[in-house]
Amino acid sequence: MNLADSAVHSPASDFSTLTPNGLIALLAQEGDRTSMELIDACIAHGEAMVQSLAAHIDDDATWEADSIDAWWLPFHAALILGRMESESSGLLLVHLMQKIDESNVSDLQDWLAGDWAALFRNKPARVIDAMRSLTMDTSLRWYTRCQGLEVILDNGMRHGPEALETAIDWVAGLANNASDEWEFRIITACGLLDFPRPRHRPMLESMAAEEAQRAKQAGSFVGMFAQEDVDSAFSKAGDRPGWERRKDPWSFYSPEAIAARQERWQEEENDLGFEEEWPVSLPYVRTTHKIGRNDPCPCGSGKKYKKCCLIAN
C-alpha cells in the first residue's frame, strides 16, 4: 500500500523498451497500484522473466527490505508465474512458496491464501509432483503445507472423477498419519470435509473425538474440528471446495480494484489522524468488528471463520 501517494498510477502503457529487470523494478515501485498491462508485459518475456524473477526471489534483499511495501514484489511474482504454463514457471512458484514460508511474511501469506489452486491450474504434471513433495515436507510450517493440499485436490478435480478420488485418498493418508503434527492433520481433515466420502468418515470421527479430548487439555486448536462439522459435511450432497468460491486472483489488477484499495488505505490513514503531521506509508489496520469463531469467514469461502482464515493468525 502506498499512502504517501495514493493516486492510482498509470505508467506508460508501452513497456516494450523495458528489460525483465526493468519491469521488475517497476513492479516494486508501483506496489499495489500495478496494472494488468504491466503484468502482461512481464508475462510476454516468458523464460527470461522466469529467470529474472528467480534471481529476485533468491535475493535476501527482496525479503529484508525496510519498506512495509517490499513484499508486493513476491506477490506480483506469484501472479505472474501463475499465468505462465511452463514447467519452469511452476517449479519456481513452488520455490516461492518455500521462500515465503522461510521468510514468514504473514501479510503476503494472507493475500495469497486461497489463490494457490488457481495459480497452479495450468501447470504440467511434474509441477504437481513437486507440490506433493512440498506438502510432505515437515520442515515447512503446517500452514504452507495446507495451502499445497488445495492445489493437489483442485488438480484432481480437473482430471476427472478417478483422478479426484486418488487425490482425496492421498490427502486422507496425510490426515491419518499419526507421526505428523496435529495442526497439519486437523486442517487437512477440515479440507476433506469439502469432499465427504463414506470411506473416510470413521477416520474423521476419530479425529473429531481426539480434538475434543485435546480441548479438555486447552490445546491451541480447541474447537477447530468437531463431530458436528463431520455430521454437517456428510448431510450435504456434492463437493464444496472453498477455493472455487474465490474470485479471479488477477482481478486484483483491475482499475476498480486499484482505486478501491487506494481509497481504503487513505480512509485508514485519515482515521489514524496522521495525514498532515505523519505523511508516510502506514500499515493497513482493520477497523471492522471482531469476527466470531463460528461466523462465516469474511474471505467468502463459505466456511466458518474458525476453519478458514482464523488458522492463518
Image (tube, grey):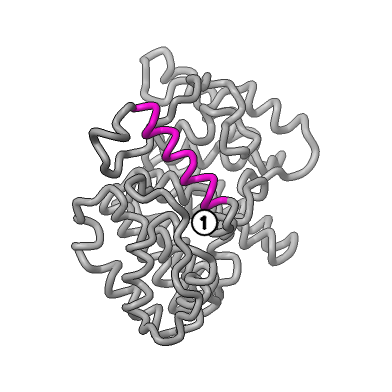
Horizontal arrangement in the rendering, residue 117 relative to residue 262 (left or right): right
The answer to whether 266 is drawn above or below residue 89 in the figure is: above
Farthest right residue? 237
* Towards the viewer: 179 or 162: 162
Q: Secondary structure at mark 1?
A: helix
Q: Position of residue 163 (x, y in %)?
A: 67, 63
Q: Main secondary structure of the magenta part?
A: helix
* Towards the viewer: 34 or 108: 34
Q: Position of residue 53 (x, y in %)?
A: 35, 73
* Magenta range: 257-272
Residue 97 in view here: no
Horizontal arrangement in the rendering, residue 33 relative to residue 51 (left or right): right
- Residue at image x 53%, y 35%? 308
Give, as a three-letter code, the residue at label 1. Answer: Trp
* Towards the viewer: 250 or 300: 250
The answer to whether 2 is drawn above or below residue 12 in the figure is: above
- Residue at image x 32%, y 74%? 54
Residue 304 in view here: yes
Is residue 271 on the magenta stretch? yes
Farthest front residue? 276
User: How dense is the environment of label 1, judged by Cα within 10 Å: few (below 14), some, or many (20 and up)?
Assistant: many
Q: Position of residue 217 (x, y in %)?
A: 36, 15
- Residue at image x 73%, y 45%? 239
Is residue 249 on the magenta stretch? no
Quadrant of the rendering where the C terminus is positioned: top left
Residue 294's quadrant in the figure?
A: top right
From the image, tell me which residue sits under label 1.
116
Horizontal arrangement in the rendering, residue 30 relative to residue 189 (left or right): left
* Towards the viewer: 106 or 157: 106
Q: Position of residue 103 (x, y in %)?
A: 26, 52
The answer to whether 80 is drawn above or below residue 97 in the figure is: below
